[in-house]
Image (cartoon, rainbow, N blue to C red):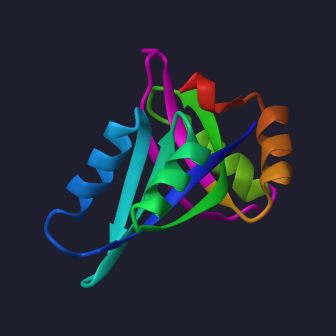
Amino acid sequence: MIMKQISVFVENKRGRLAEITEVLAKNNIDIRALSIADTKDFGILRLIVNNPDKAVEILKADGFTVSITKVIGIGIDDKPGGLAKAMAVLYSEAISVEYMYAFISRSEKTAYVILRVENNENAIKVLQSNGFKIMQSQDI
């Protein structure tokens, strides 16, 4: 139930994202979700892919600085208030969200959100007990 997220340190130079995505494409790695946070000189590209271990291996071999982080993927109702309900559940249990990003799902009724929290197991337990669906990599 815990997903592997790849984090890639990206220098803020023209073409770096093109290089990363090309390396992944050449190795048949499918990007399911992504987020990028940047500063003036660098950024962190966060990816959910179909084969995270292979993606890390090939990116490192190509000279990129890469790490794996364990995250949670949840499915929420794709309607106003869906995310607010999940955040209220985590807040009520004093679980802080370090960061999150969302993406479109294949289902019209469900939106997917990737969460990074301090204690994944506790957050999963709390979310499941409140009716939220925990996603697995193959679900997205």
Considering every residue shown, the one lying at the far left of the view is 14
- From the viewer's perspective, tell me whether residue 56 is left or right of residue 39: right
Residue sitting at x 40%, y 38% = 27
Residue sitting at x 24%, y 75% = 12
Residue sitting at x 40%, y 48% = 34
Spot occupied by residue 62 in the image (x, y as percentages of width and height): 39, 61
- From the viewer's perspective, tell me whether residue 11 is left or right of residue 80: left
Main SS of the magenta part reads strand
Q: What range is drawn magenta here?
A: 93-115
Spot occupied by residue 46 in the image (x, y as percentages of width and height): 46, 56
Spot occupied by residue 53 in the image (x, y as percentages of width and height): 61, 47
- From the viewer's perspective, tell me whether residue 64 is left or right of residue 98: left
Quarter of the image with the N terminus in it: top right
| Front residue of this view, candidates 16 and 78 | 16
| Front residue of this view, candidates 53 and 39 | 53
Does residue 86 show up magenta in the picture?
no
Is residue 56 depicted above or below 13 in this figure?
above
Is residue 17 depicted above or below 132 in this figure?
below
Number of callouts: 0
- From the viewer's perspective, tell me whether residue 62 is left or right of residue 57: left
Considering every residue shown, the one lying at the far bottom of the view is 41
| Front residue of this view, candidates 125 and 43 | 43
Q: Quadrant of residue 64?
A: bottom left
Spot occupied by residue 54 in the image (x, y as percentages of width and height): 56, 44
Is residue 90 depicted above or below 15 in this figure?
above
| Front residue of this view, candidates 35 and 30 | 30
